[in-house]
Image (cartoon, rainbow, N blue to C red):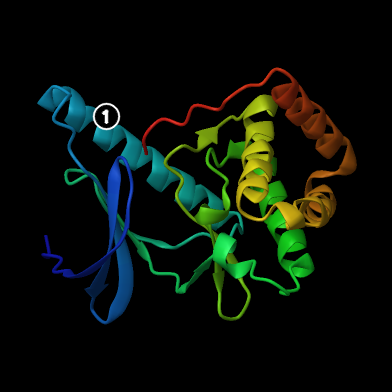
Amino acid sequence: MERLDFEEGEVLRVGAESVIKAVRWRGLELVRKHRIPKKYRRPEIDERIRRSRTIHEAKTIVTLSENGVPVPLLIFLDIAGSSIYMQRIVGVEMRDYLVDGVDFSGAAYELGRITGLTHSLKISHGDLTLSNILVAENGKMWLIDFGLSLFNATLEDLAVDLHLLGRSLESTHPSLHRRFMEMFMSGYSEVAGSAQLSKIMEKVAEIRRRGRYVVRAGT
């Protein structure tokens, strides 16, 4: 088997369960998401968990990509090393994109369409916050970080995505929340249908009424 020599670059993001680095391979600019070992777990259990989560995330990325959802292209899957090598998206996180005065209507609407398409595949993102949405220089949006994604997502799983997005907006851009979500839901209903959106929003309201705090496991 041909050896794959990756040139490692800077660390781009550090999470509770993984480290994302810039890498180069044959002139391509990539990123590597590596799930780091946890010393508090027994080694054999830790390895099994990291491999399983790596495979699951890779499967999510490939499924979404094949169905037209804008996600980084998967280049190489290193199961033994619990690492995913993906296309590097150069852009800013949505939370930084929403600066004072920016016209976000089109972006919010498009994000709604993208999320609606994802949900139509019965896949939930699991951590749909402004930090996991990248906006490129040309305005194209990309979803990233699918470590908490779910296949065969229930109505509540889908509602949690919208709940988390709303909470993220309220936390970082409270003055934009109402208008942003209005445009988001307009785009979402175009893809998923108004009836489905109504069901999900009812579930979002239920989540908020019962004061549920969504516990997100490490990715």
Residue 115, horizontal then vertical, whole percent: 67, 49
Residue 66 picture location, percent across and down? 54, 56
Q: Is residue 149 above or below residue 211?
A: below
Residue 184, above or below 35 = below
Q: The N terminus is located in which quarter? A: bottom left
The reply, left or right, for residue 153 in relation to residue 177 is left
Given residues 8 and 14, the one toward you in this image is 14
User: Does any portion of residue 148 appear in the rendered image?
Assistant: yes
In-image side of 187 versus 77 (left or right): right
Indicate the secondary structure of the residue bearing disc 1: helix
For the point 73% across and 74% down, the residue is: 101
- Residue shown at 88%/36% (left/top)? 195
Which residue is disc 1 drawn over? 49
Query: What x and y, as percent, mark residue 159?
Result: 69, 33
Residue 208 percent across, percent down from the top left: 72, 26
Judge left or right: residue 9 versus residue 114: left
| Residue type at numbered disc 1 | Ile
